[in-house]
Amino acid sequence: MKTFKLVGLSVVHDDLHRQEIPFIDGLIINKEDGQNHWLIETYLDKQYEPIFSELQKRNDEFRLQVTITNRSNDPANMIATVRSITRMNNHISVLMDGLLVRSKTDLAEVVLASLVEKGLQGEALLKEFKRQLNERRGFKNNEEKTRIQQ
């Protein structure tokens, strides 16, 4: 098994709605079982407990995007389930099982296709493309991206 630092986490509700979940710390472990199974653990503020409690209660699989090791990496798509939630004073630890889903289209293609579908062109298309790509990668602005990459 290989362990990596988790640097970004989002619950994907549908193709247009993604909820970024800020967390204090996180790990993601490749189980190396030949079937792309991963174990994800996040330590976060307890205000996010209702989100994960509801997902656990429904016992449904849900879509998750995780960014591993470096914020400049593209998020990886996963199908996940909540294994456990542990309360720790004002924080919680959420343990999830995930299956890495390898997409035939990369993040840039997905963002570009959605913007073209909205009718954006020229400079407006380029500006919104860069903004959304950085947002999906977890950057709030270009200055943050430059600072993290240095």
Image (cartoon, helix red, strand yellow):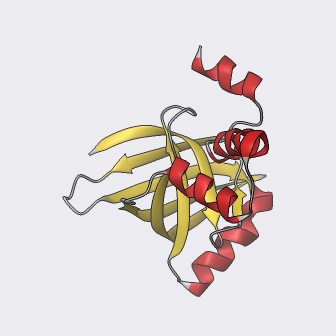
Q: Residue furthest left?
A: 34
State the image quarter where residue 63 is shown.
bottom right
Residue visible at 29% across and 59% down in the picture? 36
Residue 133 % position (x, y)? 64, 44
Residue 42 % position (x, y)? 58, 50
Q: Residue 68, relative to residue 110: is it above or below?
A: above
Residue 141 % position (x, y)? 77, 32
Closer to the camera, 111 or 146? 111
Residue visible at 61% across and 54% down in the picture? 111
Q: Residue furthest front?
A: 122
State the image quarter where residue 37 is shown.
bottom left
Image side of residue 30 versus residue 146, left or right:
left
Closer to the camera, 52 or 129? 129
Placement of the C terminus among the 4 image quadrants: top right
Closer to the camera, 115 or 12? 115
State the image quarter where residue 100 is shown.
bottom left
Whether residue 87 is visible to the viewer of this picture, yes or no, is no
Q: How many circles with numbers are drawn on the protein? A: 0
